[in-house]
Amino acid sequence: MVLSALFVPTLLMAAGTVSVGADASVDAAAGLRGSGRGEESLHASGLAHVAWESPAGDERPLGFSAYASVLWVEGRGSTERFLGDYMGANNTEAYNSLRLYSWWLEASGQAVSLRLGALLADEEFAGTAAGSELINSAFGWPAFISANTLNTGPAYYAAALGARLAFKDASGWSWQAGVYDGDSLDSPAGDDRPNRHGTHYAVNAGQGGFFITEVGYAPEQSALGMHAGIWHHSGDFTDLETGDAHGGNYGGYLVVERTLAGSRGQPGNIQAHGRYGFSPEDRSEVAWSADAAVAATGLWAWRPADVIFLGCAHVQLSSHLPDQDLERVWELGYAAVITDHFTIKPDLQYITHPGGSGDKEDSLLFTLRFTASY
């Protein structure tokens, strides 16, 4: 409440800039092989946001900013429609809804920032630059966190009330930590109806809380960067073998990123990453998972903004899960930037053991994504 009282008059009195934007995507997918052969899916999503910023200056040691967004999802994606894969073949697939998405207030100084509101940990923790181009969910918010927390944790497609403190110095060292509501859907069973529109906030001890912290080192002029983190969920988790209750779940991870050629975000740039994370398999569906990807921007002079990407992700399921062992995906795609506002992304995924079971035939999935940004 004290920080809120500080933010409100600041927002009212300080000069700043306001920006608005919108992004929309339509994904058409077809199963080319396996249990989904001959099946098709179509779904769409859209995000509209407004942001306000009053940067720090000579007279103000702190800068302030605010952000709010609305998310819309419609249709059934390939995972729900026919694949039944474990990791989620499409990172925009979600329950159909129109919802208040992420909103927050932030105070920031030269090296430190504090953010409060309905937050998304997957936008700030454990992410990679190369992985952001790929469509399979395994390359975003990783399975070693999403599968081992309650309702995937504070990540797409439901933000959670929380606070995030971050520090970064000029030498390249960084540290951040966040604490969040333990159940963004407010339903341990995963029912989206209690918080379908993103306006139902219930914080109580029964839901537990989600905590994550990360330290990184990525000097601006260096081609190599890395970050490592640990997380903990304080809710109750059932032992997969005995059925006993465990007071919490936890895990750790390591991410290594390297710029193989060029400069970050510039034509001729090639970026790669490797990422690994684990959790105790007595209470975690995913014992460990690992992924790696490489993304090349502007390999051809006549297509300076286009990106070609390749990735592989492996999820090793707990040995205590009957009739399940692993799921692995290979993904290859190309992002063709038609204009500053429009991109077409054809994508091919080969999925081994879809759903984590060797009883299902390997699947080949083709997805065509149309994206518009304003």
Image: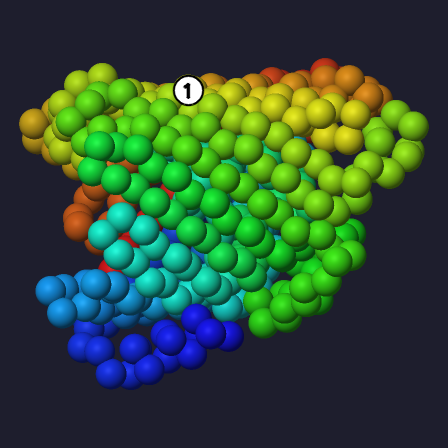
Q: Which residue is mark 1?
A: 274
Residue 372 versus residue 133 in the image, above or below:
below
Residue 240 screen position, x and y as percent: 84, 29
Quarter location, residue 260: top left
Q: Is residue 333 visible?
A: no
Residue at the image point whose x is 24% and y is 83% from the top = 13
Name which residue type carries label 1: Gly
Residue 184 screen position, x and y as percent: 63, 57
Badge 1 marks a residue whose secondary structure is: strand
> Which sits in the foreground, 211 or 256?
211
Of all residues, the one furthest to the left in this rendering is: 301
Residue 239 as seen in the image, left or right of residue 179: right
Residue at the image point whose x is 30% and y is 77% from the top = 10
Quarter location, residue 356: top right
Residue 44 screen position, x and y as percent: 47, 54
Q: Is residue 279 visible?
A: yes
Residue at the image point whose x is 78% and y is 17% from the top = 319
Residue 321 as seen in the image, left or right of residue 89: right
Residue at the image point whose x is 18% and y is 77% from the top = 15
> Which sits in the foreground, 196 or 353?
196
